[in-house]
Image (cartoon, rainbow, N blue to C red):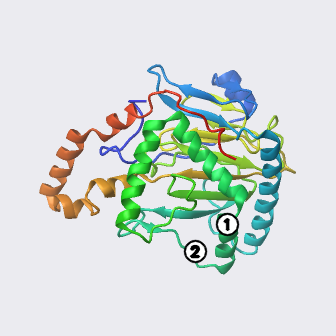
Amino acid sequence: MEDADVSRSGYVGIDSEIVHFPDLLHLTKKLGFRIVNWDGITSRPVVDKKGRLVGTLAGTPSDASKWKEAVQRIGKKLKRAQELLGLGVNDEAGERGDFVAKHLGYTHGGGRAQPSNHKHRSRTVNDVLAEILGDDDFDKLAWFQSASLSTWAPDLYSEYSNYVSKLESHYPELRRPFCSSVFPTLTVNFGPRTVCVGHKDQGNLPFGLCAITPFGSFDPDKGGHIVLWELKLIIRFPPGSTILIPSAIITHGNLPIQHNEERCSFTQYAAGSLFRWVDNGFQTQVDRFGSGAEGAAAVRKHDAEAGYWEKGLQKLQYRLVGTTSRRR
């Protein structure tokens, strides 16, 4: 992981080109990719040679029958939401795939003067997202994704919790989507055919883990697999199951689903710029270090001495703690 594309500061990744995956036969026979026929339930880590997490197949909550019913309900709710949002609201369908995506929670970067909540002008969008935030099934999903982070990467979870607490104490107006989750931001990919091309979410914390859970009426044996490009893995990814990956440094996307199928997804993550903002004393780098050549030199010196990326990697050392099965 030391060779991953990361910015000098260690707070964000590096922008990379979109990858259009070849077909399954080419991936496996020509490029040497390995298929992992995961059942979507059994939890298992993906570790590198140094025992650090590069992904977690987190599975599902332990109450299998209740969760199966919840997955069906969530799928129907997302289908209904997609239909409402499809009434002229498709502004975010773009280079990562032909689907509608909306964001909740707070972030930083992208021209923001300071960390702020995501906002939407459309009343329809706000109504749909309000229903999601008030829904018990989505709350349980958000909790499980967060609890999985705590179980598989407890040091990283503590890092998230520490920074989120500082941000929300300093800016009381900031609102996490779900109080049951440590993640400050979520994206709902409403579909109807959420099949991502290969990409990196370079704005996310590089050593952070992004939680992903798909839903919809698709056959996971025939499509919807998650492809982890640098790891040469193709993982079966059933509806309602959760995977955590360092999305800023691993190119990831999906195999196509069948032409008559639909797929949505629910993801939680944290922007690296939030962590940098706190470490800068809740101010910009220019305010902290100054501008011009002298300021740039000060930033470079600080980044080299801080070693944020190297310290972050230590928080991914694999050690299973506790269980995610005790609640609900």
SS for callout 2: loop
Q: Residue 76 placed where, x, y %? A: 82, 59
Name the residue at the right extreme.
260
Relative image position of residue 215 (x, y in whole percent): 75, 50
Image point (58%, 28%), residue name: 45
Q: Is residue 14 visible?
A: no
Distance from the alpha carbon under mark 1 to that under mark 2: 17 Å
Residue wearing tag 2: 120
Residue 152 position (above or below residue 179): above
Judge by depth and name the residue closer to the eye, 41 or 121. Answer: 41
Q: Residue at x 65, y 58 (%)?
A: 188
Which labelled disc corresponds to residue 101? none
Position of 298 with respect to 53 (left or right) is left
The quadrant holding residue 133 is bottom right
Q: Nearer the viewer, residue 86 or 94?
A: 86
Q: Is residue 224 left or right of residue 289?
A: right
Between 176 and 4, the residue placed more toward the observer is: 176
Residue shown at 72% from the left, 56% from the top: 137
Q: Give the percent coordinates (x, y) of residue 123.
A: 65, 80
Mark 1 vs mark 2: give the one in front.
Answer: 1
Identify which amino acid the numbered label 1 is placed on: Gly
Q: Residue at x 71, y 59 (%)?
A: 136
Q: Amino acid at mark 2?
A: His
Q: Between disc 1 and disc 2, whose residue precedes?
A: 2
Which residue in the structure is indicated by mark 1? Answer: 134
Q: Is residue 116 left or right of residue 41?
A: left
Q: How many marks?
A: 2
Secondary structure state at the residue bearing disc 1? loop
**Neighbour class for label 1 at 10 Å: few (<14), some, many (≥20)?**
few
Q: Quadrant of the N terminus?
A: top left
